[in-house]
């Protein structure tokens, strides 16, 4: 079971990192379109549709990855103060009541939308010469399946937390700021602080007590 959970985590992490390159691709594409429109006087009518589809693909395919890294928005005002077992019980209840039904509906409806779009060779009608959108709609059920697998993994971890009283360790991923590495890199002695004219905390406390 643990091997399966780890494989799902790793696959969704790889998918999230892969589609994360869409951020760079979308940035370059928008930059080129702005240059082409205003500098060359040659705008592309399909650019708006392409931008929407690229952003939508990134948004949907990063869902399972974000869930695996606990990156979704949550009301942490009270949740962060709960003990691990209470957090796990609350998460498990929400997964069963809302997450699983919602994601199953997403995958099922997305499959129907995608299959109909492929059959009729659907193209966008928002702009002239709209690009094909059936490949984009195929992303909807795919995103639903990845979310469903990751949701199952998260539910198993909730059960494990309820049994053990603490959250299982997860694989770490890239962070914006690696705080631990920064702490390891910074070594400031009391002599360095005195040279900078900064009193160490111990001396400050003694001075305040006097």
Image (cartoon, helix red, strand yellow):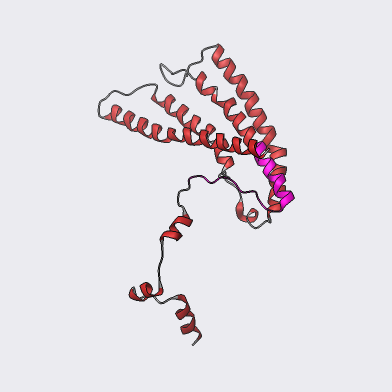
- Looking at the image, which is closer to me, 146 or 53? 146
Residue bounds of the magenta highlight = 151-174
Position of 187 relative to 88 (above/below): below
Q: Is residue 39 left or right of residue 207?
A: left
Position of 33 relative to 115 (above/below): below
Residue at far left of view: 39
Position of 188 relative to 24 (above/below): below
> In the figure, residue 116 lies in which quadrant?
top right
Specify whether residue 163 is painted magenta.
yes
- Looking at the image, which is closer to me, 83 or 60? 83
Residue at image coords 46%, 75%: 201
Q: Position of residue 57 (x, y in %)?
A: 50, 29
Residue at far right of view: 163
Q: Position of residue 64 (x, y in %)?
A: 57, 36
- Quadrant into which the N terminus falls: top right
Residue at far front of view: 3
Q: Is residue 34 left or right of residue 111?
A: left
Q: Position of residue 74 (x, y in %)?
A: 60, 47
Q: Position of residue 23 (x, y in %)?
A: 42, 35
Specify whether residue 152 is painted magenta.
yes
> In the figure, residue 36 lies in which quadrant?
top left
């Amino acid at each position: 079971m643990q091997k399966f959970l780890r494989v799902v985590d790793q696959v969704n992490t790889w998918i999230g990192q892969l589609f994360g390159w869409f951020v760079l691709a979308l940035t370059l594409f928008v930059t080129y379109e702005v240059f082409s429109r205003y500098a060359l006087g040659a705008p592309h009518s399909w650019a708006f549709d392409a931008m929407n589809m690229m952003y939508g693909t990134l948004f949907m395919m990063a869902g399972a990855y974000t869930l695996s890294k606990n990156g979704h928005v949550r009301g942490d005002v009270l949740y962060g103060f709960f003990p691990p077992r209470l957090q796990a019980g609350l998460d498990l209840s929400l997964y069963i009541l809302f997450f699983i039904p919602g994601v199953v509906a997403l995958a099922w409806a997305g499959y129907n939308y995608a299959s109909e779009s492929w059959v009729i060779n659907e193209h966008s009608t928002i702009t002239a010469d709209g690009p094909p959108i059936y490949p984009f709609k195929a992303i909807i059920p795919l995103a639903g399946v990845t979310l469903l697998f990751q949701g199952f993994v998260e539910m198993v971890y909730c059960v494990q937390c309820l049994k053990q009283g603490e959250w299982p360790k997860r694989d770490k991923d890239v962070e914006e700021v690696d705080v631990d590495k920064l702490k390891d890199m910074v070594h400031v002695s009391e002599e360095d602080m005195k040279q900078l004219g900064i009193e160490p905390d111990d001396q400050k406390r003694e001075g305040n007590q006097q």
